[in-house]
Amino acid sequence: ARVHAHLDELRNLEESKVRTSQLKDEMLSRVEGRISELERGAAKAEEVSSLKSDLLSRVEKHAAELERLDEKRNDLAKYKNELLSRAEEHVREVGRAAEKEGQVRAFSLEMEERVREYEAHIVERKKISERLKGEIAEAALARLVQ
């Protein structure tokens, strides 16, 4: 969500840059028209100079603002790349964790199978032990009876 917000901000910055450039061109066009108009009248020469200075100052401010916005856009692009890199690393970590979980599950199943085999072996040994005890008792009884 933050990446999308940053992307939206980057788009807004680009649109603002275009609008500012258009405004700059329009303003320069107006200034040039006004200057040529004012230069025709000698009495208005001082006004032309003042307007020109004021408008050029505004244009310089807009240019400075564009530079600042470009720097901000570059910073946001770097941040976006960093976030994407972190997200990719997280995806890799999740993949590794899922793989390890599968290995643990397989090992657990294998151990459960071995435990069942061992328990079956113990049960079989008990049966054999009981049978042998019975045979020994019968043999001992048969000897006593003789």
Image (cartoon, rainbow, N blue to C red):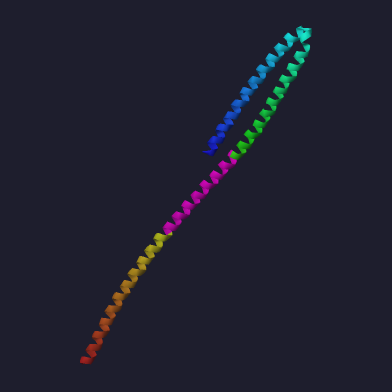
- What's the magenta region? 80-106
Q: Residue furthest left?
A: 145
Picture coordinates of residue 113 (x, y %)? 37, 63
Measuring 78% from the left and 8% from the top, which residue is drawn there?
Answer: 43
Q: In the rendered image of this protein, does residue 2 appear above or below residue 117?
A: above
Q: Quadrant of the C terminus?
A: bottom left
Picture coordinates of residue 121 (x, y %)? 34, 71
107, 43: nearer the viewer: 43
User: Is residue 63 covered in magenta?
Assistant: no
Residue 107 placement: quadrant: bottom left
Q: In the rendered image of this protein, does residue 43 appear above or below residue 108?
A: above
Measuring 42% from the left and 57% from the top, which residue is drawn there?
Answer: 105
76, 86: nearer the viewer: 76
118, 53: nearer the viewer: 53
Decide whether the magenta segment is chiefly helix, strand or loop. Answer: helix
Residue 48 placement: quadrant: top right
Residue 6 vs residue 129: left or right? right
122, 64: nearer the viewer: 64
Q: In the rendered image of this protein, does residue 52 appear above or below residue 4?
A: above
Measuring 28% from the left and 80% from the top, which residue is drawn there?
Answer: 132
Picture coordinates of residue 35 (x, y %)? 73, 12
Picture coordinates of residue 101 (x, y %)? 45, 55
Total number of numbered labels? 0
Residue 62 placement: quadrant: top right
User: Is residue 83 covered in magenta?
Assistant: yes
